[in-house]
Image (tube, rainbow, N blue to C red):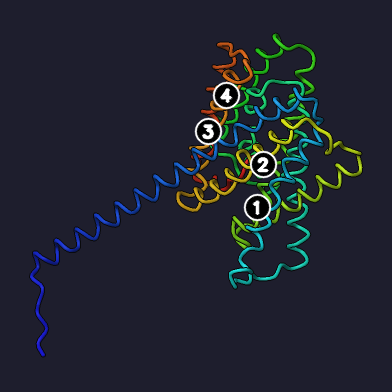
């Protein structure tokens, strides 16, 4: 039986059609990924607003943290172990990997979140988000020191721009809120530092476990640490105002679970570098929400500082050597 030959013109049209279809698929994939990261950043930015609202109800930092992680735990447990229900058995963890995962979870989510929540007692939600957003520059500096990675000119410029922005925002808030600002800024900077250390470790664990499984297990380790802390410190989890439980639930769903999974999906679709660039909407979103919900004032100096921090973070994220990103605290 003779096969029919395909005319060159038809073959060329078919090839062009396939190329166009692939291009549309890639464009759609990038758009969906960017939207996932964008929505994730907006959702993450609500955390500071919710913390401030909870403090107005008289909730302490540890109790609020326990509510956040306690309500989040079932979702991350399903993400970590739900595959077994569908017959998918993940590869077992080695003892070393298990210990590393617990340490990173406690460092990156428990300690970072606790420091952040304490800091929010003393500074505005807008300044908190700006200070937290220096974590990409901290990753660059720490890696340069630990692994003798040479800083690029772009990275040095990004460091200068970012910390100039933080200085402007800090100076503006110091004049309006007073002597407690340095204390709050120090706590939030400690949060950014611990989260940066977590990211460096996570960058070596995610290839082994996958981003979703690693994030879920790390958050479960952090949840255990938070609940142990709450129990040991006698935190009041019962008898809180009903609105406090509602805020804790919203924080768990809107500012923890949803953005964590959206960010993981976005990174899978567009990569960590572009995802980090898209996530620079976070500080701006927090400042706008703080203005609308908490009536926090925005001075021209703070607005300029915000712009500089966003520019600096974007320069770091767009660096060819920059390859890590993860969920925010």
On screen, residue 124 above or below 264: above
Relative side of 137 to 123, left or right: left
Does 171 sit left or right of 324 as displayed?
right
Q: Earlier in the sequence, mark 3 or mark 2?
A: 2
Which image quarter is the N terminus in?
Answer: bottom left
Mark 2 element type: helix
- Whether 25 is drawn above or below 120: the answer is below
**Residue receiving disc 4:** 289
Pointer 1: what residue?
A: 75
> Where does label 2 land, which residue?
252
Q: Marks 4 and 1: CB-CB under 8 Å?
A: no
Q: Nearer the viewer, mark 4 or mark 3?
A: 4
Task: Between label 2 and label 4, give the one nearer the viewer.
Answer: 2
Tag 1 and tag 3, C-beta contact below 8 Å:
no
Distance CA(mark 4)–CA(mark 3): 15 Å
Q: Classify the position of the C terminus by image quarter.
A: top right
- In the image, 188 versus 221, the foreground residue is 221
N-terminal label among 4 and 3: 3
Tag 4: Cα neighbours inside 10 Å, few (<14), some, or many (≥20)? many
Estimate the spatial distance between the alpha carbons at disc 4 and disc 1, rounded to whole Å: 26 Å
| Mark with earlier residue (2, 1) | 1
Work out whether 46 lies above or below 305. below
| CB atoms of marks 2 and 1 within 8 Å | yes
Question: What's the residue at 73%, 12% (across, down)?
Answer: 177
Q: Nearer the viewer, mark 4 or mark 1?
A: 1
Q: How far apart, in angstroms, are the residues tagged by discs 1 and 3?
A: 26 Å
Q: Residue furthest top?
A: 175
The residues bearing labels 3 and 2 have C-alpha atoms spaced at a distance of: 22 Å
| Disc with the residue nearer the chain's start (4 vs 1) | 1
Rounded to the nearest whole Å, what is the CA distance between mark 2 and mark 4? 18 Å
Residue under numbered circle 3: 280
């Amino acid at each position: 039986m003779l096969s029919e030959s395909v005319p060159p013109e038809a073959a060329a049209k078919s090839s062009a059609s396939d190329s166009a279809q692939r291009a549309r698929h890639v464009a759609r994939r990038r758009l969906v990924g960017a939207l996932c990261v964008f929505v994730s950043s907006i959702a993450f930015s609500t955390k500071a607003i919710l913390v401030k609202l909870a403090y107005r109800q008289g909730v302490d930092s540890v109790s609020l943290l326990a509510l956040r992680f306690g309500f989040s735990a079932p979702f991350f447990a399903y993400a970590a172990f739900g595959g077994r229900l569908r017959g998918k058995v993940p590869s077992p963890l080695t003892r070393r990997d298990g210990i590393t995962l617990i340490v990173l979870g406690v460092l990156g989510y428990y300690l970072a979140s606790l420091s952040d929540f304490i800091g929010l007692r003393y500074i505005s939600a807008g300044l908190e988000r700006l200070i937290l957003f220096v974590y990409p520059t901290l990753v660059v500096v720490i890696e340069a020191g630990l692994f003798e990675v040479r800083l690029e000119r772009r990275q040095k410029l990004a460091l200068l721009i970012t910390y100039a922005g933080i200085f402007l925002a800090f100076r503006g808030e110091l004049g309006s809120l007073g002597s407690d600002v340095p204390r709050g800024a120090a706590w939030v900077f400690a949060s950014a530092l611990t989260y940066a250390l977590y990211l460096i470790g996570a960058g070596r664990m995610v290839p082994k476990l996958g981003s979703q499984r690693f994030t879920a297990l790390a958050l479960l380790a952090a949840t255990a640490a938070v609940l142990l802390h709450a129990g040991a410190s006698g935190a009041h989890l019962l008898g809180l105002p009903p609105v406090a439980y509602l805020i804790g639930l919203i924080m768990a769903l809107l500012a923890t679970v949803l953005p964590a999974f959206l960010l993981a999906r976005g990174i899978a679709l567009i990569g960590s570098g572009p995802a980090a660039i898209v996530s620079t909407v976070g500080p701006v979103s927090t400042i706008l929400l703080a203005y609308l919900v908490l009536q926090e004032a925005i001075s021209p100096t703070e607005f300029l500082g915000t712009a500089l921090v966003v520019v600096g973070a974007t320069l770091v994220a767009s660096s060819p050597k920059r390859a890590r990103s993860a969920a925010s605290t």
